Amino acid sequence: MKKTVVTLMAAGLLAGAIVAMPVYADDYDQVTFAYATMNNLPTEEGLSTVQEAVNEITREKIGVEVTLKPIGLADYTQSVTLSLQAGEKIDVLSSIYTFASDVSNGMLYDITDLIDEAAPETKELIGEDWLKTCMYEGSLYALPTYKPVASHGYFVCRQDILDELGIDVSTVKSAEDLTDIFAQVAEAHPEMTVLAPLSQGNLDEGSLWYGIDYLSDSREKAYGVLFDGDTTVKNLYESDYFMEQSKLVREWYEAGYIMKDAATTTSSVSELMTSGNYFGHFTENGLMPEDLAAILTSLEGGGNPITVIDLREPYISTSTINMVTWGIASNTKVPEAAMKFLNLTYTDPDVLNLIIFGLEGRDYVLDEDGCYGYPEGQDAATVPYTAALSNGIIGNAFIMHRSVGTSEEDNEALLEANKTATVSPALGFMFDSTDVSIQYTAVNNVASQYLPGLLCGSTDPETELPAFVDALNAAGLQDIIDAKQKQLDVWLAENK
Amino acid sequence: MQTKVKEKKSTRQKTAPLFLIALPGIVYLLINNYLPMAGLFLAFKRYNFMKGIFSSDWCGFDNFKFLFTTKDAWIMTRNTILYNLAFIILGTAMSILIAILLCELGQKLRAKLFQSVLILPNMLSWVIVSFVVFAILNADSGFINNAILKPLGIEGVSWYTFTGAWPIILIITNLWKSAGYSSIVYMAGISGIDKSLYESAALDGATKLQQIKNITLPMLKPTVITMTIMSVGRMFYSDFGLFYQVPQNSGALFPVTQTIDTYVYRGLMENNNIGMSSAAGFYQSIIGFILVLAANAIVRKLDRDNAMF
């Protein structure tokens, strides 16, 4: 009796094992696509149905089967790095702000020749100029996401309060012009704080600075920059321009327009704005003002209308374009299949829209203008699959379904802006900081000590800025500037 | 011969269960403390992702340089050591005080209640503690500025940029969080003291304070020494949560809140250099090891019986 039971159980187990064994057809290459999502992670069932729908297309078109691997944005870089180190299979991955270090760490596959073979359409779409920003020592390692990059500097604020005070914003052209508006708002609404910081320790008045190429650094911490048209690397913080801007911010702070704890608050700007206690904030964005206003009204208006004032023309530099790039893992077994799939994410609307929005009808619906929305009674948090917020970091933003309030013409205008915006003379140059990493560590610490206070106005630039510059120089900033200049000169000689 | 074997066998039989009890601890030590030591290689390598830990190129002591290049090196070392000294001295005094008071309470229920209340903060994560502190110190709506200074007609202080206050704030926060928990060890020590000592002292007319001074404290000496030597070994480490979360990462406070751990974190968070971070860890362990040996040597000189080894 006992024996029979055991045999039966064994047989059952065996049968189960056979059924559960994944059936791989030999003639399809397997590609794992790891992408960052800013939405909730999809449900297991939601993910597998979308994956199957993608596979139906890819099997036929390129003979490839894809495994979708969505990862939360906050964990993305670390998670992919660890998976690759552990030998887990990931073939296609993106570098989010980390292109330079991913290349120097040897994570990315050299796709110089592969792109001609497997992705000629994408190569033509993106164009040589943009691809240059993903080159390192003459080889191509990644593709930049194709999206509106010609970003403007905006001041975002409450339309209802402007209306109430009868303020006309059409004459506002610069940061200085805002001071008057702030004064009126502060007077009429003493219970309100005028300016919310964009992120901890950063008011981001810097999004209004025009014509600065940060040369692989960010606006928040810039060690050696190019001012418009010039090719001499300079210390931003020693410039008269920075002093002027810091004084303006300081003036606002002393007048009480800026949140007192701006240098240390950990609340996000949308939390602050939604609370209704803040008038506005600065930001940089690639969207048209009207589109951004429509999106922000729902995101941070808290029931109030939001308007966007355009205060700075776009300026394109290397880091604007290679902020998010897509590449192939250097240890992949199927480079060609991976490249072919990557090609589809730039050129095939069906594949791309499946990855971004999921299944039409279940995860999203299209209205008569062709804009996407969620099915009746559902939202981004309840549908089985959506990665709609990742629309700017995957593939080609111009062939995705549009969001409500935008039109086909806007898309064309954005595409046009990408081509006509002023570009930095160093577009395509990438700084390799390996030799000055000790100095970088030191100046990073100095910057996190002094910058929040200066950028949020809580310290006096007259005394603190010179101290900051001295501390930077003592930490070896000049070595970084020299290294940048040297590499830039070599690059300019090669590319002129 | 026969008896010797038997004896050996019986000691093995006696010790086997003890080993079994220690086994989880030993396994934990091996996996958690000894296996990762292979990572020390990284401190001397220019780490390349695809080459891996062992085949990356050697770079000598380059990774250690960043710790010593700037004048920050002095500030962070000073802060780390001084804060730890303050924690060791004040923390020990505070925990002993709490332990004595709790033991004097006598009544079980009351003592248990106070003990639980005192231990509770230790269960909180630093992130939560940092918001408790924030609720008290916040410039716009914090407790001190709004409920104390405002009614008194004093203008609010922007605490997160006021360097002078932070050594005290950090020490108080740390004591509040950890003193209750570390008092457990001393309470155990006190309950191990022979009760007849107190009885005879009471018969001789000793007051409570005299009993504490002449019986409790001397009897606790070995415990204090062991605990101190252990914390001296961690003197070059700092509690990251305390120094990073509680001051809300405020730049203006760096001169008084920067420690070796926060410096390494801030410096490397952006350029993601694994080699340099393991160099920093290695450096801390070496100094920690030397400090333990030194502290023990001093104790052995002063009082042989109480030295750990």
Image (cartoon, coloured by chain):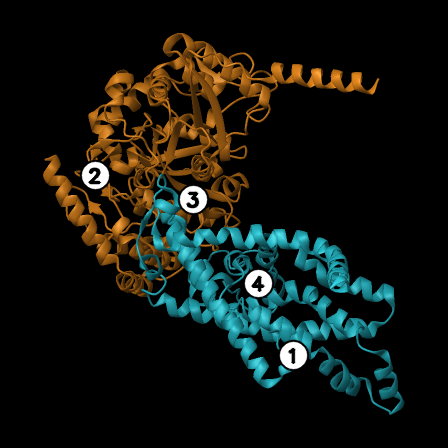
State how far apart marks 1 and 4 are (Cα): 49 Å
Q: Name the amino acid, label 1.
A: Asn
Q: Colour of chain B?
A: cyan
State how far apart marks 3 and 2 are (Cα): 28 Å
Residue A35 image-quadrant placement: top left
In the picture, measured across the screen, residue A378 lies left or right of residue A290, that is right
Labels 4 and 2 within one chain: no
Q: Are marks 3 and 4 in contact (CB under 8 Å)?
A: no
Chain name for mark 4: B
State how far apart marks 3 and 4 are (Cα): 25 Å
State how far apart marks 4 and 2 are (Cα): 50 Å
Q: Name the amino acid, label 3.
A: Leu
SS of the residue at dot 1? Answer: helix
Labels 1 and 2 within one chain: no
According to the picture, the residue beneath numbered tag 2 turns out to be A429
Label placed on residue B145: 4
Label placed on residue B306: 1
Q: Are marks 1 and 2 in contact (CB under 8 Å)?
A: no
| Residue A419 on image: x %, y % | 23, 25
Query: Which mark is in front, 1 or 4?
Result: 1
